[in-house]
Amino acid sequence: FAPWPRPAHRCHHGGMSTPSWSPPPSRSAAHAEGKALRKKVPRRALAELATRNRDALGILRHQNSTRVAELLPLRDERMSASPFAFYRGTAALMADDLGAGPSTDISVASCGDAHVANFGFYASPQRTLVFDLNDFDEGAWAPWEWDLKRLVTSIVIAGQTSGRDDAVTANAARAAVLQYANALSRGGDDTPLARYYQHFDAEGGLTTGDKDSRKVLRRAIAHAEKRTGEQAVRKLTTLQADGRLRFIEQPPTMTHVTPDVESALDASIEQYLVSARSDIQLLLANYALSDTVRRVVGVGSVGTRCYVSVFVDGNGSALLMQIKEAGRSVLSEYGGCAQPAPISDFVGRFGEGARVVALQRILQGVSDPFLGHFRAPTRDYYVRQFRDMKGGIEAETLDDGPFRGYAQACATVLARAHGQSPTAAQVVGYLGSGKVAAEAIVEWSYAYAALSGSDYRAFLDAVSARVDASASDDQAPAAPAPEASAAPTV
């Protein structure tokens, strides 16, 4: 995977002449380039919320058109829960709106959905607990400020949803931008190799911050440490008389797949193994597929195809793997972010699942060693472990002090992720101290929170109308059953 266009600083051979060589741009030169960009796109311009002929509900309908129809009412239910839940499920709307406004055009490897609920804990290969970004379905190359605005707006909406004083919410939002600028600048003082190895151990947070924040973190760590694959196997499966592990159905969130779908997924394992690391390929040779279910996950992902498979070894030990559908990133599909040619070529060859895996490996400090991908006839997928000490912190439930601290922690992690891109030093030069940008981005985020709130109310009205229409249909005579149904596809 070539994550960036090939740099120009290479040896150039001219026949028998001495090769010429030029180094990459220095940090100070990149800073100057970023600072000069302020003349073209002033930092205050980051406050401008521009929209095009937007149709918020139309975008959601367009997304639903490719999803499992029977799960769409559940998506409506989860997104209706609160303004923050709705915001979590509307990355496509925000990408569309971000694409309409002014942009620095300094692109970095981006998460695409960096709201506060998409940061959390998981186990490293060394079995320590780390804190990092944990959702990369929308990952792509995009302007750095798009991720930051997604994060800061989530802080604003989470603060408003939890009913806290607006001064507290605004302070946390501003602190997040300043922390991002500071962390990105400090990271730039390290070598690229040092930035690559940097990650955030969850336990490290117990030695910093105030007493209340440490208490929240200690409780979240304890919860994450209990969410192991072994615990999930005990909770979600049952041992059959023939010794086979089978999932316990929990409709509609967990249901068995048809034999055709199970057979197709089983056949795709070989494709996945080709994309996996050699040590994982050998490890999985000890296991056989025992059972597969379709499982509903998340908020915005509801309706996409997601499966969980249980594998067992010869002695009955189990391993849970998640297989998740990967569509186009909203940053490119709705935001209009043109991807560098190497990225487009890569996705064309290996699929959207490969994009998700690649962005996860780039943006996380340490990643699940089981990551891989495969292509089905009509859809792309990526694969990872299921529930390997994964956990998080619900920002809406925090007291004011930990709420601000959590916002800063997320901003630090985002800066580390963006710092992997060669353009990060330009962002540092553009931001400067971060104070001007902080005021602009917080202003934009409050304006977007209001727009999202308006979308939320329209969404609730539309859901209510659908429920009423469905109730009317239930009272009408039933239509004749179709003679046959199409064969299911993965």
Image (spheres, helix red, strand yellow):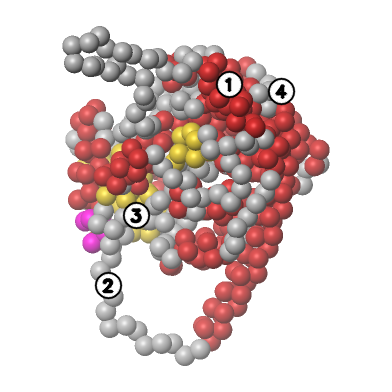
> Which SS class for mark 3?
strand
Q: Nearer the viewer, mark 3 or mark 1?
A: 1
> Sequence order check: which comes first, mark 3 or mark 4?
4
Q: Can residue 331 be seen in this view?
A: yes
Q: Main secondary structure of the magenta part?
A: helix
> Does the CB distance between marks 2 and 1 fall below 8 Å?
no
In the rendered image, which residue does mark 3 sit on? 293
Q: Earlier in the sequence, mark 4 or mark 2?
A: 4
* Residue at image mark 2: 486
Dot 4 amino acid type: Lys
Label ID, residue 397 = none
Residue 343 position in % (x across, y down): 35, 40
Q: Distance between the residues labelled 4 and 2?
A: 59 Å
Residue 229 visible at all: no
Q: Is mark 2 on a helix, strand or loop?
A: loop
* Rendered image quadrant of residue 427: top right
Q: Which of 66 and 185 is in front in this view?
A: 185
Is 409 drawn above or below residue 487 in the view shown?
above
Residue at the bottom extreme of this rendering: 477
The residue drawn where x is 26% and y is 45% is: 349
Circle 3 packing at 10 Å, graded few (<14), some (14-19), many (20+), is: many
Query: Which residue type does callout 2 highlight?
Result: Ala
Q: Using the image, tell me which numbered label, if any, was put on residue 211.
A: 4
The crowding category of the residue bearing disc 1, from other C-alpha atoms within 10 Å (few below 14, some 14 to 19, many at least 20), is some
